[in-house]
Amino acid sequence: ARDFKLADHPAIPRGIPLMLIVLDGWGEQPDGEYNAISKASTPIMDSLKKGHPDYWRLVKAHGPAVGLPLESDMGNSEVGHNAMGAGRIYKQGAGLVDSALADGSMFTGGWKQIQETIEKGCTLHLLGLLSDGGVHARLDQVWGLLGGAIERGAKKVRLHILTDGRDVADGSSFEYVEKLEKYIEELNSKGADVKIASGGGRMRVTMDRYETDWEVVERGWHAHVLGEAPNKYTTAAEALKDLRAKDPKVNDQYYPPWVVVDDAGKSVGTIEDGDAVVIWNFRADRVVMISKAFDFEDKDFPFFDRVRRPKVTLAGMLEYDVEIHLPSIHLVDPPQIEGTSGEYLAKNHVRSYACSETVKFGHMTFFWNGNRSGYFDAKYEKYVEIPTDKGIQFNEKPPMKAAEIAEAAAAAFKSGEWDFVRVNFPNADMVGHTGDMEATVVGCEAADKGVEVLLKAVEDAGGIYLVTADHGNAEEMVKHDKDGKPVLTKDGTPQKLTAHTCAPVPVAIGGPGLPKNIKLRKDLPGAGLANVAATFINLCGLEAPSDMEPTLLEVVEQ
Ligand code: 3PG
Ligand code: CO
């Protein structure tokens, strides 16, 4: 068993309050025309960067440094917050699914129960994000799952697809659907009965997170399960084309729900008692809510009227919540993230306060704690959620709730009730994902103002700060080729980059409470977000667990 007792740090006393700030989607790249962060007026973050190199450095936030398969894999919030919270690098969902497909174990565990329903002749429904982004899902894995199911005797398969445009370029849904249709044709020519049955854009249909807006999931439930949507088409491709032509605000992220119907106008794929449903996303946050809709009894499900809840066998590609075991069946075991900083700090009686607005709230709690919901010890922890506005696209209100988050966290910090306050400002990421340059500039400015408020609180309370980010996004708003030139679309304008990047992120420390002999190390060129955990544990006055990635701090001779 793990010994959770941590020794006192030799040079940093306990009890100096620490403020940790995560700027979501704030990567470091050269200034430029398409860098929303350098375009924005961000005096506070600029002053940290221009300060002494003893107090500002970069760390990696993408690829193998955060447990992703390839050096070309951009970072994301799940792996970033997992790494910061756990202080270790785990092989993450994308890679675990790759391995399970390669060695066949995908079809030997939880799959057995899906297999039983297939053998009874029931319909198999596959649902998830149709994307090559590798953040929530990947196309080759969907093909692997679908092909593997057919090989194992599945006859009738219905697909429910959410279009992306957020981790990949807007409009890529057309290409992905074409590829999927082609694969389906191949399978059907050999006797299978596979069809796309319903879909919608991920931000409007099904893939809400942290209960920002249950209506998103309700729309998905109606389309996927009940086979009802205002928009009815005979093919998915037609749906994508027609809905875009009808409304210029529609894009891959925000397609309304649609269903595919037969000649009689009836849905080709409602979900019925006895059917099997497999959700192919490996990432948890945006499929927890739909999983609950399938798995929870009426008495535990006050969120919307499901009208009809079919008794299905539901499996997740991974287990999405390891604490409550949701869904009850999964195909691939998630990373075993144990002994996180949150658990260590609670067990060493460091009083921790976490805050963000809804869309990033679970990042600072659920992801931070290794995909666990709830407290380790409520006596030493408080998690505060500022409600995100519902039903808007984030470029419509780029400051989001930065001011409210800052206000809450500053008050908590000054109260003296907390030793460690951690917050996430979502702006650079959430507005960055819209591809709207001007709005993202405004969002970055709002985040910088939030940092200003918090650093002032640190100053007033004699505390320490650590400012960092989870991955890049806003610093690269258009796609660049390998020579660094913007990639142009057919009409000659630069192609918007809505996705994250492979940029490194800053780590800055300071504040009146930081002992004079503590500096950031300049070695560890390969350091990444996992090194942040030992760093903040040290700043709380404790030695870090020996199995965490090394601290970024050094104690210098005076
Ligand atoms: C999302 O879920 O919003 C994006 O796919 C990834 O963004 P995040 O990793 O910053 O949450
Ligand atoms: Co993001």
Image (cartoon, rainbow, N blue to C red):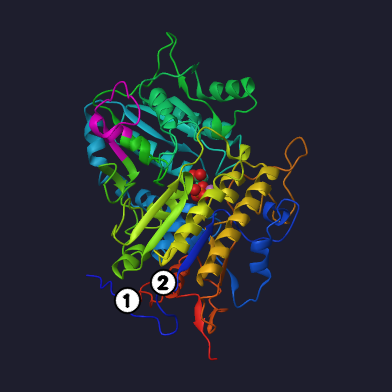
Among numbered discs 1 and 2, the one appearing first in the sequence: 1
Q: Which residues are magenta?
A: 293-315
Residue 481 in picture, x, y percent from top left: 70, 52
- Please tell me which residue is depicted at 28% across the width and 25% down the height of the picture: 309
* In the rendered image, the vertical position of residue 211 relative to residue 184, given as above or below: below
**Residue at image mark 1:** 6
Whether the magenta-drawn stretch holds residue 305 is answered as yes
Q: Amino acid at mark 2?
A: Ile
> Residue 453 or 329: which is nearer the viewer?
453
* In the rendered image, the vertical position of residue 227 relative to residue 424, given as above or below: above
Q: Quadrant of the N terminus?
A: bottom left
Question: Residue 87's image quarter?
Answer: bottom left
Q: Work out whether residue 400 can be spotted.
A: yes
The outermost residue toward the top is: 264
**Residue at image mark 2:** 537
* In the rendered image, the vertical position of residue 165 relative to residue 30, given as above or below: above
> Residue 369 or 402: which is nearer the viewer?
402
Helix, strand or loop at disc 2? helix
Image side of residue 119 versus residue 545, left or right: left
